[in-house]
Amino acid sequence: MITLSIILTVVITTSIFIIRNLIMKNEKLEDFITKQSEAINACDVRLKQLDQKGSFIADDEIGFFFKEVEKIQEALNEFTLK
C-alpha cells in the first residue's frame, strides 16, 4: 500500500510538472501567433494606404508588381486571427 502511494505521488508530481511546462509553451505560442496576426494586419492596412488613389495599380510596370504583392497579402490574411 505504501509502495502504491509513493508511485502515485511520483506520477502525479511528474504529471503536474509536464502539464505546467506544456501550458507555458502554449502561452508563448499564443503570444507569437497574436503578434504575427497583428503584423499581418498592419501590413494589410499599410498596403491599402499606399494605393488609396489607385495610382500604383493603374501604372503598367508598377501595377504588375503591386498586384502580386496584393496576392501575397491576401494569402497572409488567411493566417490572421479572426
Image (cartoon, rainbow, N blue to C red):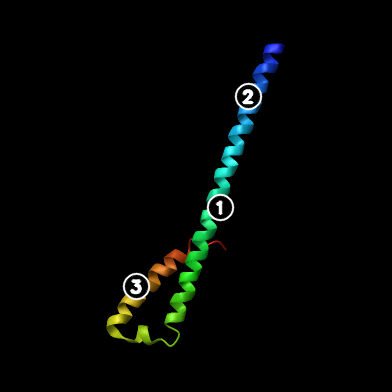
Q: In the figure, 39 relative to 45: above or below?
A: above
Q: Is residue 11 above or below residue 40?
A: above
Judging by the rendered image, the residue that carries numbered circle 3 is 68
Q: Tags 2 and 3 in contact by the CB under 8 Å rule?
A: no
Element type where label 2 sits in the image? helix
Pick the residue in front: 32 or 78: 32
Q: Secondary structure at mark 1?
A: helix
Of the residues shown, which amino acid type is indicated by label 3?
A: Glu
Quarter of the figure with residue 57: bottom left
First of labels 2, 3 by sequence position: 2
Sequence-wise, the earlier of marks 1 and 2 is 2
Q: In the image, what residue type sits under mark 2?
A: Val
Q: Quadrant of the N terminus?
A: top right
According to the picture, the residue beneath numbered tag 1 turns out to be: 30
Name the image quarter holding residue 74: bottom left
Q: Position of residue 62 (x, y in %)?
A: 30, 81
Mark 3 neighbour class, 10 Å CA radius: few under 14, some 14 to 19, many 20 or more: few
Where, quadrant-wise, is the C terminus in this rendering?
A: bottom right
Query: Label 1 is placed on what type of residue?
Result: Glu
Numbered tag placed on residue 11 in the rendering: 2
Whether residue 81 is situated above or below residue 57 in the rendered picture: above
What's the distance in space between the residues labelled 2 and 3, CA to CA? Answer: 55 Å
In the displayed structure image, the side of residue 14 where residue 53 appears, left or right: left
The structure residue drawn at horizontal position 61% and vertical position 38%, both measured from the top left corner, is 20
Tell me residue 52's x, y (percent). 45, 85
